[in-house]
Image (tube, helix red, strand yellow):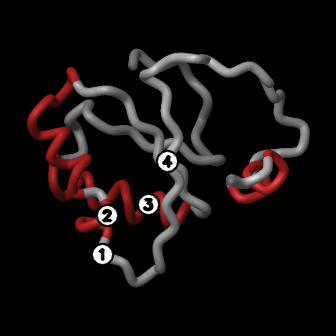
Amino acid sequence: MLSRKKLIKALCISEDAVTVFDSPDRPNIKLHISCHKATTDLDSVFDFLMDLMLDQHSHMPRYVIFCRSINDSSKLYLMFAQHFGKDNHIFIMFNSKTIQKPLNL
């Protein structure tokens, strides 16, 4: 199990981020960490999620996928866009350069 400091460093979370030390104790909140080589086929990694998106569309649970770089996040976004189209309201991409504005999610 990763220590809190290692996890914060691995996720590139800012040192001045607010940390809440309370377990949500909710069955719908889960954490899964998976590292893959740059050569790994994204389709095979996210096959389960694309199947869920096809089956449940807007009724599926929300997922947050953390990427270490904007480039990695762009590759992931492109993969989803190729499968579902850009204007589908099933997925959205945020990064450190995303302009802050209210969203209706």
Residue 105 appears left or right of 53: right
* Residue indicated by mark 3: 74
Q: Nearer the viewer, mark 3 or mark 1?
A: 1
Where is residue 77 shown, x and y percent of the image?
Answer: 36, 54
Where is residue 65 shown, x and y percent of the image?
Answer: 47, 47
Check contact, mark 4 vs mark 2: CB within 8 A. no
Separation of marks 4 and 1 at Cα, in angstroms: 19 Å
Nearer to the camera, 36 or 82:
36
Q: Nearer the viewer, mark 4 or mark 1?
A: 4
The residue drawn where x is 56% and y is 23% is 101
Q: State the SS at label 3.
A: helix
N-terminal of the pair, mark 3 or mark 1, is 1
The residue drawn where x is 61% and y is 61% is 68
* Residue indicated by mark 1: 41
Question: In the rendered image of this protein, does residue 4 appear above or below residue 56?
Answer: below
Bin the neighbour count of mark 1 within 10 Å (Cα to Cα): few under 14, some 14-19, many 20 and up: few
N-terminal of the pair, mark 4 or mark 1, is 4
Bin the neighbour count of mark 4 within 10 Å (Cα to Cα): few under 14, some 14-19, many 20 and up: few
Q: State the SS at label 4.
A: loop
Check contact, mark 3 vs mark 1: CB within 8 A. no
* Residue indicated by mark 4: 32
* Residue indicated by mark 2: 45
Residue at the far bottom: name it. 39
